[in-house]
Amino acid sequence: MIEFTVRGIMYEGDSNHILCRQRPKGAIHFVPEPDNAHDPNAIAVVYEGIKLGYVPKSKVGYEGSYQEMASKARVGEVVRYSYTEDRGETWNNEHNGRLGSVRVSIAMEEEEFSPAIGAKHVRISALLNYLNLGGGFDGIIKWAFDQGGTHQDYVRAIGDAQDNGTKMHEDIEAVLMGYDSDGNHEPKGLANWIEKFEPESLESEVRIVDTRIDVTGMYDWLGYVTYKGVRHLALVDWKSSKAVKPHHKIQASFYASNARSIETPTIAMVVAFGSKAKQGYSASVVEQDEIKSNYEGVVLLKRTLDMLGVKFKDGDCI
């Protein structure tokens, strides 16, 4: 494993205010810029579609340069980041000022390298669409058309549901991670969930890439919870649906199998806050044996689709 600090973040941030407020976690991608006027070997460091800066030119030693290592790996991981209020004179971890420093790592072992540059990773949600579990997506379409009689109404209903789901996730993250939020979309059952499971947060909204099958996704929360009287490291996914569906549990199992932490999550949990239950949520826990079998099912599904020559749409990939 090698590490380096991304260069040029201040310069990029001067023209991109969105970059200045980023809190990068998890996977980053290395994207070559052969047309770069200053350096044809330049490799951009990209986090969720936003350029953070560049891989430094410095030599690593006998292994070669950081640029050579990044071009082989294609995917790295954020180690830490810092904010600054005075363009680098002082640094802080309280998100005061603007993002000014990001340190990333690259795996050195050959088997950990990702596929060739230019390959795309399929979103786990798009992959699981092929399972068509729990009655499939006709139910979603019926629900959407129930909101209105035209195609425009259908599109608007789907969009509103997605926006509300995103805002709900943001408010949950704010509560558990201690961020500021207006709380307008905090689910009513969250306080009851906290009281029962006594969560201790480690991280949230982290993108992972499974290079074994080229599938990616972002899990909602990782931390410790109390389950059946025992503290567990848990991978938790939040849903706004009325109930936990089979594909929700498979998705959470995929995340738990790929979470990069000091310990391996011992349980995965899906929490549906659209439930009409008295406590305001419905929770389903996936234990270790089921996590493993669900993950192998994802591997088998992806390889079967690859064998059949299924081509995923651009919007289904990152």
Image: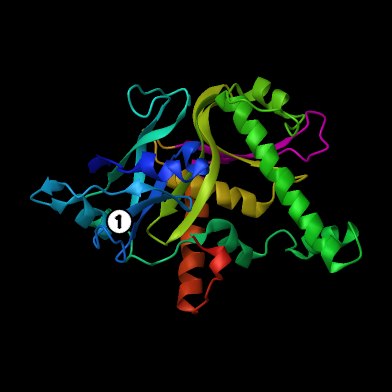
Q: Is residue 109 visible?
A: no
Label 1 sits on what residue type?
Answer: Ile
Res. 9 in view: yes
Residue that badge 1 annotates: 43
x then y, percent, for residue 56: 24, 47
Image coordinates of residue 110 in percent, x first then y, are 22, 56
Q: Which region of the structure is painted magenta?
A: 265-289
Q: What's the coloring here?
A: rainbow
> Vertically, is 21 above or below 16?
above
**Residue under the image location 42 percent in, 61 percent down:** 214
Residue 303, relative to residue 101: is it above or below? below
Quadrant in the rendering for residue 13: top left
Residue at image position (83%, 59%) is 144
Residue 185 location (% of width, % of height): 74, 34
Question: Residue extending furthest right?
Answer: 149
In this picture, residue 68 sits left or right of residue 304: left
Percent from the top left, x then y, of residue 273? 74, 38
Q: Which of 24 and 131 is in front in this view?
A: 24
Residue at the image point whose x is 28% and y is 54% from the top? 112
* Of residues 181 and 235, the one drawn nearer to the viewer in this rendering: 181
> Looking at the picture, does residue 224 appear above or below residue 66?
above
Q: Residues within 10 Å of mark 1 (few under 14, many from 20)?
A: many
Query: 186 left or right of 78?
Result: right
In the picture, measured across the screen, residue 273 lies left or right of residue 126, that is: right
Q: Say whether residue 98 is magenta.
A: no
The quarter of the rendered structure image containing the N terminus is: top left
Side of 227 relative to 48 (left or right): right
Placement of 63 over or under 94, stated as above or below: below
Q: Which of 1 and 130 is in front in this view?
A: 1
Q: Is mark 1 on a helix, strand or loop?
A: strand
